[in-house]
Amino acid sequence: MKKIRNILICGLGAIGGYYASVIENHSSFNLKILVDKVRLNKYQAEPRIINGKIYNFDYITPDYDNFKADLIIIATKSSGLENAIKNIKNFVDNSTIILSFLNGISSEKRIAKYYGEDKVLYSFLLGHTFFRSDKNITHDGQATIYFGHPQLNQKIEQVKNCFEELNISYNIPTDILNSMWNKFCFNCCANQISAITRMTFGEMINSKKCKELIKNICNEVSIIAKKEGIQDTDKFFENTLNSFKLMIPDGKTSMLQDIEAGIKPETDIFGKTIVSMGGKYSISTPYNKVISDIIELL
């Protein structure tokens, strides 16, 4: 079985930057960071500082033609996905594996549309909040990458071996799609509620009113998920509460961090997705509609 050695990361925000630092610290891997020319100049002039250490990564632009990736990690915001899909073209060959660390439930399908189902594993992250302030990125390492696929067993094994060599925490669920929807449900609750209330994870889970709102959002997500063929949707609310308890109480969601930093939040991948899918099935989703509409006004 081919070992993963050449890794490309597209997106050097908090998550992409943290995992880039982990890989960079292992000399047996060849890591490159894909950037446009504007970011290339910026990152070279102001290197990323990750958990207090300065990193001068090996940056390449989309027109670079001397690198094929065994593994590509896309860690952009949802608004940058289409550009990322186009920009990785030169670095994909027949054996390339692509992982998306984006929130939501649609990025894998969008990537597979360009490069084929045989190259894309389903994946998501669950763990403590990643923080970024300008060029500084901090994280305590308490995060797990969940990944899998109904058929691509050899590619799953390749990524598993890679993460073990890198000492990256991972989990391979028996039903990756169910697990993704559970994480999506948690995000629809945590990110959206925090964006409006400015509450931390601890404040949300300890608020009776927030718990009621969480339950109502979960109910809407579970109804849509069931229509999509997802099993055990009746456990979404319980699993969402358990996910809240895994978070640092003082931690803030990525959406709240974006709002506080003056960055437009990713409204399209949470409540608006549920509203759109509700329209597809003629199902009313009032809680997700109202809360996503309010966030768009922020």
Image: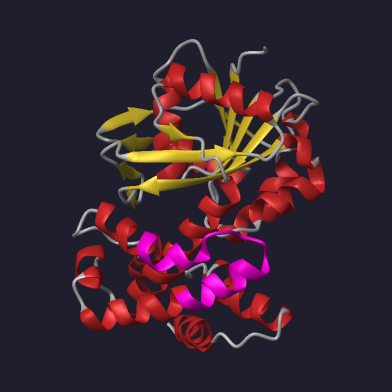
The count of marks equals 0
Model colouring: secondary structure
Viewer-proximal residue among 47 and 133: 133
**In the image, residue 218 above or below residue 231:** below
Does residue 54 show up magenta in the picture? no
Quadrant in which residue 150 is drawn? top right
Q: Which sits in the foreground, 243 or 200?
A: 243
Q: Taking 125 as reference, is 176 left or right? A: right
Position of residue 267 relative to residue 295, above or below, is above
Locate residue 292, reporting x and y percent: 50, 81
Quadrant (top left, top right, bottom left, bottom right) of the N terminus? top right
Q: At x 66% / y 70%, what residue is drawn?
A: 227
Residue depicted at x 26% and y 39%: 140
Magenta extent: 219-239
Q: Position of residue 246 (x, y in %)?
A: 27, 52
In the picture, the quarter occupied by the C terminus is bottom left
| Horizontal relation, residue 75 to residue 138: left or right | right
Q: Position of residue 228 (x, y in %)?
A: 67, 65
Q: Residue 4, relative to residue 269: is it above or below? A: above
Task: Work out whether 15 lies above or below 82.
Answer: above
Q: Magenta: predominant secondary structure element?
A: helix
Left or right side of 253 for 45:
right
Question: From this viewpoint, is residue 109 visible?
Answer: yes
Is residue 47 visible in the rendered structure shown here? no
From the top left corner, tell me how far across and down residue 101 is, in percent: 53, 46
Query: In the image, what residue occupies the spot 76% across and 46% down?
Result: 112
Residue drawn at (72%, 48%) of the image: 111
Q: Find out whether residue 227 is within the magenta segment.
A: yes
Q: Nearer the viewer, residue 297 or 249?
A: 249
